[in-house]
């Protein structure tokens, strides 16, 4: 996984929770809170302890959050 994740999200890739949290510069527990409260969608379950999110969705959510902060 690249060090500077925020500038290298691949829209076609899938990312686990820890990478998502790093992308938004938040803690892992905050990422899970976002999914629980609906700020972020729940993700795709690949197994009992594996959930992933699409890179395209992460980029879209970041644009949305920036627009909300500016508006």
Image (spheres, rainbow, N blue to C red):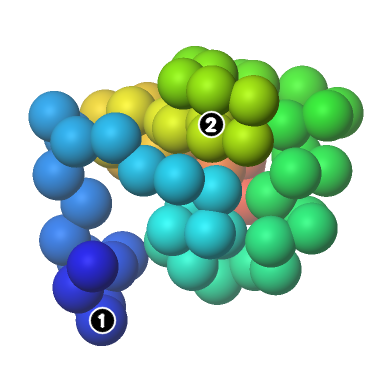
Q: Quadrant of the C terminus?
A: top right
Q: Secondary structure at mark 1?
A: loop
Counting residues from the start of the chain, the first of labels 2 and 1 encountered is 1
Q: Quadrant of the N terminus?
A: bottom left
Q: Residue 37: x and y, percent? A: 86, 28
| Quadrant of the image occupied by residue 10 | top left
Look at discs 2 and 1 and give the one toward the viewer: 2
Q: Which residue is mark 2?
A: 51
Q: How many marks?
A: 2
In the rendered view, would you say 57 is above or below 67?
above
Residue at (63, 35) in percent of width and height: 49
Q: Is residue 71 left or right of residue 9?
A: right
Q: Which residue is mark 1?
A: 3
Specify few, some or many for label 2: CA neighbours under 10 Å numbering under 14, 14-19, or 20 or more: some
Q: Nearer the viewer, residue 13 or 61?
A: 13
Q: Residue 35: x and y, percent? A: 73, 31
């Amino acid at each position: 996984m690249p060090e500077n994740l925020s500038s290298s999200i691949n829209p076609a890739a899938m990312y686990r929770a820890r990478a998502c949290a790093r992308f938004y510069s938040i803690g892992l527990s905050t990422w899970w809170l976002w999914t629980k409260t609906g700020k972020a969608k729940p993700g795709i379950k690949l197994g009992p302890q594996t959930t992933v999110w699409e890179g395209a969705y992460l980029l879209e959510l970041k644009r949305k959050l920036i627009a909300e902060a500016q508006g």
